[in-house]
Image: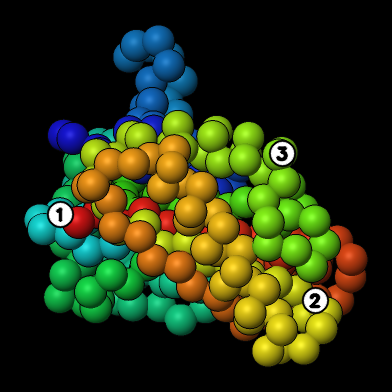
């Protein structure tokens, strides 16, 4: 199978795990498939979900999006064991995709989502089919229809209240372009975000100006005509976390770069 983003395609973080007996193996579902480390006599690197067990994982450097054909692979070890699949943008509101089953399950989300919608969370729920090791045995979860998602700290890019890139910010963008070059084409969306300090109007203006600065520099570094560019300023509207401390406000001051396949 072909994954356009390579290693970036795989789930990055375990959000929650509900297992009747064991939660310790949940991280085995992350990253590339590695059911056996050194052959059939080695320890299995899979997460056995257990009967009625549940696993929620998150994509952090990419996002699941609908493309032509299959959009998601669930790599499962052993005999086919039915599992229910849900996807979410925020880990709170879920879209039911339905039942999948074993081996390498190819999933097309086309009938359940809108055009260019981005999903970061996948939830698997075992449907209680008995076997030697109870529950679906998940080895890896990969987004085929994948959008690159990169988060840049505004403190690295800009001085306080400014939208002109610092030298360190330009260097950071050079590193970011290395990831973007994995794709030969795409729709690039540059999103500016702030904390809640200042007025909502000024924050929105600043976030858009910063998005435009980043976009302008990236266009110089990635001059291919196969990329289409769009800038958005969200101000304080989409925080990553509550603006209740200096540390959290720093997390919310950011520029996000999304590259959707076209």
- The residue pinned by badge 2 equals 243
Q: Earlier in the sequence, mark 2 or mark 3?
A: 3
The answer to whether 75 is drawn above or below residue 101 in the figure is above
Which marked residue is nearer to the observer: mark 2 or mark 1?
2
Residue 15 image position (x, y, % from top left): 57, 58
* Residue identifier under label 1: 70
Quarter-wise, where is residue 233 in the image?
bottom right
Residue at point 56% right, 41% down? 173
Foreground disc of the pair 2, 3:
3
Query: Judging from the image, what secondary structure is the residue with disc 3 in?
Result: helix
Examine the image and state in which quarter residue 128 appears.
bottom left
Q: Position of residue 47 (x, y in %)?
A: 45, 41
Q: Residue at x 71, y 39 (%)?
A: 167
Asked whether disc 3 touches disc 1, contact meaning CB atoms under 8 Å apart, the reply is: no
If you read the primary sequence from the N terminus, does the residue marked by circle 2 or circle 1 appear first?
1
Q: Nearer the viewer, residue 187 or 82?
A: 187
Compare residues 93 and 44 and report the one nearer the observer: 93
Q: Residues within 10 Å of mark 3 (few under 14, many from 20)?
A: few
Q: Which sits in the foreground, 47 or 75?
A: 75
Which corner quadrant holds the N terminus? Answer: top left
Q: Which mark is residue 168?
A: 3
Q: Earlier in the sequence, mark 3 or mark 1?
A: 1
| Label 2: how many Cα within 10 Å (few below 14, some 14–19, many 20+) | some
Circle 2 SS class:
loop
Q: Report, in whole angstroms, how far the alpha carbon at label 2 lies from the one at label 1.
A: 38 Å
**Label 2 – label 3 distance at C-alpha:** 26 Å
Residue 189 screen position, x and y as percent: 41, 62
Packing grade of label 1 (10 A; few <14, some 14-19, many >=20) is some
Which residue is most to the left?
A: 69
Is 227 placed left or right of 34 in the picture?
A: left
Q: How far across and down, in percent of the image, does residue 193 sit?
A: 63, 70
């Amino acid at each position: 199978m072909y994954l356009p983003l390579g290693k970036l395609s795989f789930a990055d973080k375990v959000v929650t795990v509900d297992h009747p007996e064991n939660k310790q193996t949940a991280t085995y579902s992350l990253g590339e498939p590695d059911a056996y480390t050194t052959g059939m006599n080695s320890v299995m690197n899979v997460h056995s979900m257990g009967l009625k067990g549940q696993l929620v994982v998150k994509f952090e450097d990419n996002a699941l999006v609908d493309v032509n054909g299959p959009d998601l692979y669930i790599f499962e070890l052993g005999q086919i064991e039915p599992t229910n699949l849900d996807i979410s943008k925020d880990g709170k509101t879920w879209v039911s995709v339905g039942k999948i089953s074993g081996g390498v399950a190819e999933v097309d989300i086309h009938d359940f989502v809108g055009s260019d919608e981005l999903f970061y969370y996948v939830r698997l729920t075992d449907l209680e089919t008995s076997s030697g090791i109870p529950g679906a045995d998940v080895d890896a979860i990969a987004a085929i229809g994948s959008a690159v998602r990169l988060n840049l700290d505004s403190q690295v890019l800009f001085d306080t209240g400014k939208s002109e890139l610092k030298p360190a910010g330009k260097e950071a963008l050079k590193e970011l372009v290395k990831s973007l070059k994995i794709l030969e084409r795409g729709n690039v969306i540059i999103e500016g975000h702030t904390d809640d300090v200042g007025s909502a109007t000024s924050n929105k203006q600043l976030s858009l100006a910063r998005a435009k600065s980043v976009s302008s520099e990236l266009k110089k570094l990635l001059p291919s005509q196969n990329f289409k560019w769009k800038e958005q300023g969200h101000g304080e509207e989409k925080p990553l976390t509550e603006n209740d401390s200096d540390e959290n406000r720093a997390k919310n001051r950011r520029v996000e770069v999304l590259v959707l396949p076209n």
